[in-house]
Every structure is written in structure tokens, then in C-alpha cells.
Amino acid sequence: MNKTLNTAINLAKQGIYVYPLATGSKVPLKGSNGEKDATVDQNVIKDWFIQNPNRNLGINLGASELAVIDIDQHNEEANGIKHWSDYLRNHGPEYMDSLKTYMECTPHIGYHLFYKTNQPLPKEDIELVPGVELLSGKVMAAPSFISEANRSYAPYYQGFPNLDINQLLSLPNWAIDLANEVSTKPEPSVEYRSTKKLWTGKLIDEVCKGAATGNRHNWICHIAGMIKHSGADTVPAYELVKFANQHCDEPLPDKEVESIFVSLFSKGA
């Protein structure tokens, strides 16, 4: 039995709803319904992962009565590890104890902290502090990996080598209160009128527009070309192309986005 199948069956036995993702990406299988297909039916799960043992593993958090605090460190302003550590320390030992649950390292030097919850949560992902989100819909789980550098999701050993629902802490009430507080904050009341849209404004509009499934490749090529024309440095340019891809109806696999980017940016100006 392959590792991903073994993990998926083990989770299903605990009542945790799982579903397959494309190899090396967060994208659902072509023709599937993503997390809506999540199940605890072991026969269905075996079909998924015997067909392709390299598929990534997703969890439908809501159906499983789970929640995840996702800690990333994208940059200094959104360094979730620093901001979450400061937030917990400033509120005392009870808040620091929330770290004593099952945790996974993510491919980009972040962490997923898993919790049980039977309380209603906001349906969308909620940024608790810069670089830290509360996930209540879906999440990737170990042993999934990202193919662009073959980076893996992996348990962060502190007494919990595997995701075991009986060993998880309950999501603290203060975290739920924080999520509800953040999600109900009113939007800034501003009146914005642009008298003339500059080229940069057109780029911003295009990046957030997204594309339908049948036009994704051409649209990403178009976006990457615009970003290249802007003169942006390579690393932020690539991050912006990946950001644009997430606005597609069904994002392209990371490997395809990388291939488009390398092809365009390796060409002369």
C-alpha cells in the first residue's frame, strides 16, 4: 500500500473526509468537484490513490469538523511566524498552549496547526494577523508535495507523528472570537474615482480578472508578458504570475505556470 493511500485510509477511519489533488499541486483532479468529492468511503479512496499513488491529498475541513491555522512567512510585513508568536506571547500561557496540537511543516517554511471544532466558522479563509489565516474549508495534508521543488508537507514532531483526531486540541474560543471579529470588520468607507487609468492600473485589473478553464494558458502567457514589460524583478514577477493563476476558474498546475514563466522570461526583451 503506498504512503498517500495508507494515510488517506487512516484518516477516513477517523471520520476525516479526504479527496485527491493533482500531482505536485493544490489543483483538484480534472473533471472533479474538489473538496465536494471528499469522502470516508475506503473503496472510493483506494480507487483514487491506486490509480495514481503520486496524487496529493486534500481534507475537507468543514465535513470533518476540523480547522487549521495556517502560518506563512511571505515577507517581513507578512511574517506569520513572528506575528503569531508575538500575539500568543502577549496574551499569556493559555494562548501559548494552543501550539500543543498536531502540526505540519509546509513547503514554503510555514506551519499548519490542526484543531477539532464543532462550532460554526466563517466560510471563507480569515486572516487573523498578517501571515496567519484560519482555514475552515479545505487544506492539503502530508504526505503531499509541491513539484516545482519537490517540497513536501510533513509532520512536525512534538509527540504527534500522525494526524490523529483524538489527539487534537479543540480550536480555542479566543481564536474563533478573533476570526469573527476580523471577518465582521467594516470595509473602509472611501469614495474612489480615477480620472485616468494608467498602464499600471490596467495591469492590476488584468492580474485579478482570471480566466475560464479553456483560456487559462493563453491568459497566463498574456499576464506574464505584461509583467515582463513592466520591468519587475524576476522573483516578484513570478510571485505575481502565480497570484494571477489563482484567479482562474480552475488554476493551472504550478509546473505549467513555471514553464510558461521560464519560457517568456528567458527570451530577450
Image (tube, rainbow, N blue to C red):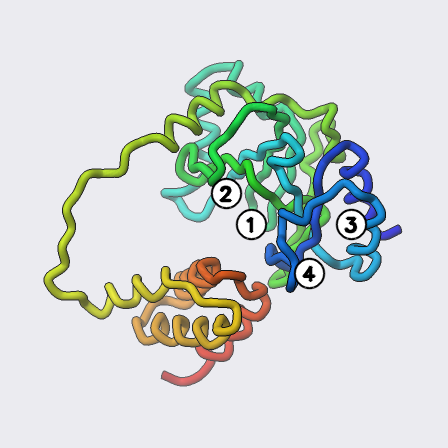
Secondary structure category for the residue under label 1 = loop
According to the picture, the residue beneath numbered tag 1 turns out to be 108
Q: Earlier in the sequence, mark 1 or mark 3?
A: 3
Tell me if label 4 and label 2 are in contact, CB under 8 Å. Answer: no
Q: Which of labels 4 and 2 is toward the front?
A: 4
Left or right of 118, for residue 52: right
| Image vertical order of residue 34 relative to residue 168, above or below | below
Mark 1 Cα within 10 Å, few/some/many (few <14, many 20+)? few
Q: Measuring from the top left, give residue 180's x and y in whole percent.
A: 42, 27
- Tag of residue 72: 2
Mark 4 Cα within 10 Å, few/some/many (few <14, many 20+)? many
According to the picture, the residue beneath numbered tag 4 turns out to be 23
Quadrant for residue 265, please give it.
bottom left
Q: Earlier in the sequence, mark 3 or mark 4?
A: 3
Please name the amino acid that badge 3 sits on. Thr
Mark 2 Cα within 10 Å, few/some/many (few <14, many 20+)? many
Q: Quadrant of the C terminus?
A: bottom left
Please name the amino acid that badge 2 sits on. Asp
User: Could you say which is closer to the camera, residue 62 or residue 73?
Assistant: 62
Q: Measuring from the top left, give residue 211's x and y in whole percent.
A: 44, 67
Q: Earlier in the sequence, mark 4 or mark 2?
A: 4
Q: Measuring from the top left, give residue 190's x and y in whole percent.
A: 17, 43
Marks 1 and 4 sit apart, C-alpha to C-alpha, by: 17 Å
